[in-house]
Amino acid sequence: MATLDHDDRPTLASPAWTLLGALRRRIRQYVWLEGSAAAVAWLGTAFWATLAADWFFEPSPLVRAIMLAAVAAVVVLVLFRMIGRRAFVPITDGNAATVLERRFPQFNDSLLTAVVLGDRPADDVLGEEMLARTCREASARVEEVELRKVFNPRPLWLHCGAATLLTTSVVMFAVLFSGAFGVWANRVLALSGDPWPRYTDIVVDGFTDGVRKVARGSDVEIVAKADTRMPRVPEKVEIRYRTEGGGRGRVTMDRCGISRGEEDYYQEFSHTFRGVLSDIDFDVVGGDDRVNNLWIQAVDSPMISRMTLDCELPAYIRRRQPPLPVTGVMQIPTGSRVTVRAEEANKELVRVQVDKVVAERPETTEVLEADKLNADHSGFSHTVERLDDNTTLLFTLTDTDGVTGRDPVRLVLVAAPDQPPQMAVQLDGIGAAITPQARVPVVGRIADDYGIGRVWFEYAIDDREPANQPIAELPRAPAAFNLNDAALEVRPLGVKPGQKLLMTVRAADLCDLGKGPNLAGSERWLLEIVTPDQLRAMLEARELVLRQRFERMLQEVTETRDLLARLEFESEESANPAAAPAGSEPGDKPDNLDSADTPERRAALRMLRVQSALSNCRKSAQEVLGVAEAFDDIRKQLVNNRIDTEELKKRIQEGIARPLHEIAGEMFPELERRIEALLADLESQGQGPALRNRAQAQADEILLAMQKVRDRMLELESFNEAVELLRKIIEMQKELKEETQRRHKQKIRDLLKE
C-alpha cells in the first residue's frame, strides 16, 4: 500500500482552525475576567467587613494587621485558584474540539476526529478519503457555531455584578464619606492609632487595663458615663457579657439621674452583677460607641485566719491576762488596754481601715498602711488604749489585688464592768428581838472576782443616821472572805427596850475606776430591842409550839410503826388460819368468804403499806431535824442575848437538841434502809417476816428515843414555869417594896403638913 506525504493530507478548512483559536482566547478571557471580578468582589467585601469590625470594635493594631494579612491571603488564594490554576493551562486543538463537540452535538464527532486524525500519519488511500470527508463535514458545520453558547455566563455575571456593586459602593462611600474612608485607610491599611470619630462617647470607670478584680461572691456595680457634650446621648446602654462557663447574655443598664451641665457633663448608667463567683468578660455598647473587652476577675476576698487579744488589765485587779483567741463576742474587764493582733491573712495586705464604734456611736477611723502592717504584710495590730464602754472594731481589708473585703471583719469588745461583791450572809442565833446587851453574830461568805477590800457593819437606831463598825480590812484583797466570828456588840450602842435596830453587812472591792469601789450589802435586818424577860417569854412560847409539833411527829412515827406491824405474809397466813365458826364441820366453806381477797390484792396491799411507811420515815426524819435545829437556835439566842444559864443550856443542848440530831441523823436513816430492804424483798417473800420485824424493832427504838426527848421538853417546860413563877414572885416583892416606900413617904408628907 502506498503512503501519502503529510503535506498532501486532508485537513480542516481555515475557518475551523480560526474557530478553535478563538475558543482558546475566549476561555482565557473568561478565566481572567471571572478571577479578577472575584478578587475585586472579595476586596469590596473585605472593605466593608474591616470597616464594620474596626468601627464597632476598634481592635488593636495587631488585630488589624492580622485582618489585613487575612484579606491579602484570601486575595492570593482567589487569584491562584480562579486564574493561576486555569489561565496558564495549555489548551490543545483536541481540548478545544472536545469542548465544541460537547456543546454542539451537530458536529457528530467530526471536528474532534478531524483534529485528532489530522496529526497522525496516513496508512492508506482509503483512510485519507475518509479523513477528507470528515474534514469537509466539520468545516461545513463551523459556520453554525456561536462561541458564546460554549460558556455559562451566570458565574461571570455574578462575579462581575458583585464586583461592580461592591466597587460602586466603595467608591460612593469614599466620595460621600471621605473622612471616614480616610480614617479606615489610616487605621486598616496604615495601622495607625487614630480613633474613629464618634457621635457618642462612653466611659467606664474602675478598670485598670480593662481588668477589675473583685472579691468572689460580692456584688459588682458597673457605671458607664455618656458625655453629654457629644452630639448624641444614648437612650440606653447595654452590657453584652460572656461568663467563664460559656454563658452569654445582654442586659440594659439603668439610667441614673440626669447630668447637671457644667457641674457634671456625664449621664450615668449602672448595672450590678449580683454574687460574682467567676470571671465575666463584657462589652459596654451605647449609641455608636462601645467599650470592649472589659474583664471582671473574681478573686478570693482578703480574710484573717487568726486573731488574738493582748489585754493589760487595770492595776487593781493584780493579775496578768494571757493572750485570748478571738471567738465571737469578747468580754474584757472595763478599763483594760486591749491590743488586737491579726495574723495569717490569706493574702498580702496593703491597707487596713479600722472603724471604731463605741456604744453604737461611730468615733474614730484609722488607716494602717506600709510600716503599720506586719513585716510580711500578712497581719496587723491595733490598740484600744482604754476600754470604758462596749466597742465594735470594723477592719476593712484591702489586698495587693486592690480587692477590698466584701464585709469588714467585725470584733465586738464588751466592756465587762467590775461587779459588786457577792454576799451570802445571814444572822446566826438571833431572832427578830434582842436585848440591849446582846451580841449579834453573822455568818456567811463574801466573794468578788478581783478581791475584797474591806467589810463592815452598817446600823441605824430608829430614825438616826446610819453608822459603821469595821469587821475587817483586807489589804491582800482575797477573792473570798468567810464570816465566822464577826458580831455587832449592841451594849456600846446604848439602845433601850422599845427601840429598833436596823443593821446590815456591807463590803467593798478595790475598783479604782469611775465612781470608785463597788459596794454590796447583805439583807437588812430589823431587830426590836426588848427586855430579857420579854425575850425569855418569846422563846418559851416558841418552845411550846415546837413541843406541840414534836408530839404530832411522835404520833406519825407511831402510825408508821403500826403500818409495819399490820404487814402479813402468805407463809404466816397459811400457818395461822382463822378460827372456824362454831358448829362447822371440817371441809365446810365459810359463809362470809370475801371473793375479792385474792393473793394479788394482798400483795398490792403489802406493797402500799411498805411504801407509805418509807415515805413517812423520810418525812419524819426531816421534820425532826427541823425541830433539832430550832432548839439549837433557841440555845444560841439565849447565849447571844446574854440571858442564858448553864442549867438551861445543858437542858436544851444535852436533853433535847443533841438527841434529836441523833434520831434524825442516825436512827431514821437506819429505819429507812431496813424498810427499803423489806420493799425489795416483797416480790420473793423469802425473808419478808424477818425484815419486817427488824424494821418494826427500829421504829420502836425511835419511838422510845422520841418519848424521852418529849419528857425532857416537858421537864424544860416545868422548869420554865418554875422560873416564871419565881420571876413573878420577885416582881411582886419589888412592887410591894415600892408600894411600902410610897406609903411611907406619903405618911411623912402628911406629918409635915400637920
Image (cartoon, rainbow, N blue to C red):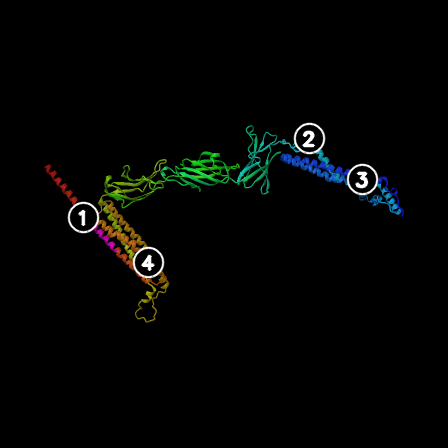
Q: Quadrant of residue 470?
A: top left
* Local SS, label 3: helix
Q: From the viewer's perspective, tell me whether residue 130 is left or right of residue 348.
A: right
Q: Position of residue 54 (x, y in %)?
A: 64, 34
Q: Earlier in the sequence, mark 2 or mark 1?
A: 2
Q: Quadrant of residue 247?
A: top right
| Residue highlighted by disc 3 | 23
CA distance for labels 3 and 2: 43 Å
Q: Which mark is residue 675?
A: 4
Mark 4 crowd level (few <14, some 14–19, many ≥20, 10 Å Cα)? many
For the C terminus, the quadrant is top left
Q: Please, what is the dominant secondary structure of the magenta stretch?
A: helix
Mark 2 residue type: Leu
Q: Position of residue 663 (x, y in %)?
A: 28, 54
Q: Earlier in the sequence, mark 1 or mark 4?
A: 4
CA distance for labels 3 and 1: 171 Å
Q: Quadrant of residue 156?
A: top right
| Residue highlighted by disc 1 | 726
Mark 3 residue type: Leu
Mark 1 residue type: Leu
Q: Earlier in the sequence, mark 3 or mark 2?
A: 3
Foreground disc of the pair 3, 2: 3
Mark 4 residue type: Ile
Q: What residue span does the magenta drawing correspond to?
A: 707-727
CA distance for labels 1 and 4: 49 Å
Q: Which mark is residue 176?
A: 2
Q: Which mark is residue 458?
A: none
CA distance for labels 2 and 1: 145 Å
* Local SS, label 2: helix
CA distance for labels 2 and 4: 123 Å
Q: Are marks 3 and 1 in contact (CB under 8 Å)?
A: no
